Image: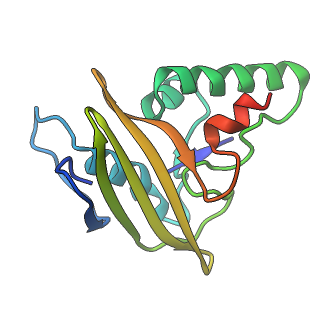
Amino acid sequence: MLRAAAGADQPGPTRRQSSASATPEGAEPSATSFVEGIYAPYKDKNGNGNLLDTDTAVKRYFEPKLATLIIKDRNKAAKRGDISTLDMDPFIDAQDWDISAFDVAVRDTGADKATATVSFENLGKPTTVVLDLVKLREGWRIADINWGRKPTLRGLFAKR
């Protein structure tokens, strides 16, 4: 079972210590709010993070093409009785966590695109995760994740 966990849209980097951020009712969430919403559940070490165990959950966080790759891979692995390619939590680059705070920096990279750099200490290990974001009609979604090593999340599925 996969778990996952959260930037403003102004040009240049925006840094915020993650906290519960409210978006006015009816207002569209910013890229920062989207990312903070992903990581907020990880502050509770006894929580579940964000489960990626349903198609709906995967589509909530990832842009359609990447979501399709993740879902197809998961379904094929289940048919084989095997573990899917994504055998860890992509948001924290680990399976377990003990995280108390996140630093989120979001930078616009083009029309309806942004990059979020999320830094935190997990189980005593400094970790940085970079999310490539794209804004769709449904809101912000992740186009790729880079953990500072090859391959990226999208690259994991390109190899298959």
For the view shown, which residue lies furthest in the bottom direction? 124
Work out whether residue 90 or residue 160 is closer to the camera in this orientation and state it: 160
114 vs 57, left or right, is left
Which residue is found at the position 72% from the left and 29% from the top? 158
Specify how the rendered protein is coloured. rainbow
**Nearest to the observer: residue 53 or residue 129:** 129
- Quarter of the image that includes the N terminus: top right
How many numbered circles does the render carry? 0
Give whichever of 3, 136 is nearer the camera: 136
- Along the horizontal axis of the image, is 152 left or right of 143? right
Q: Is residue 64 left or right of residue 160?
A: left
| Residue shown at the point (31%, 55%) measured from the top left | 106
Identified at 46% across, 68% down, the residue is 119
The percent coordinates of residue 35 (x first, y second) are: 36, 50
Horizontal arrangement in the rendering, residue 78 relative to residue 103 (left or right): right
User: Within the image, what quadrant is residue 140 found in?
Assistant: top left
Residue 46: percent from the left, percent from the top? Answer: 55, 63
**Residue 35 visible in the shown view:** yes
* Picture layout, residue 14 above or below residue 35: below
Give the quarter of the image for residue 53.
top right
Estimate the x, y position of residue 128 in percent, counting from the top left. Answer: 53, 65
For the C terminus, the image quarter is top right
Q: Position of residue 148 (x, y in %)?
A: 61, 59
73 versus 113 height, above or below? above
- Say if residue 6 shows up in the picture: no
Query: Which residue is pictured at 72% across the width and 38% down the height?
Result: 156
Q: Which quarter of the figure has residue 159?
A: top right
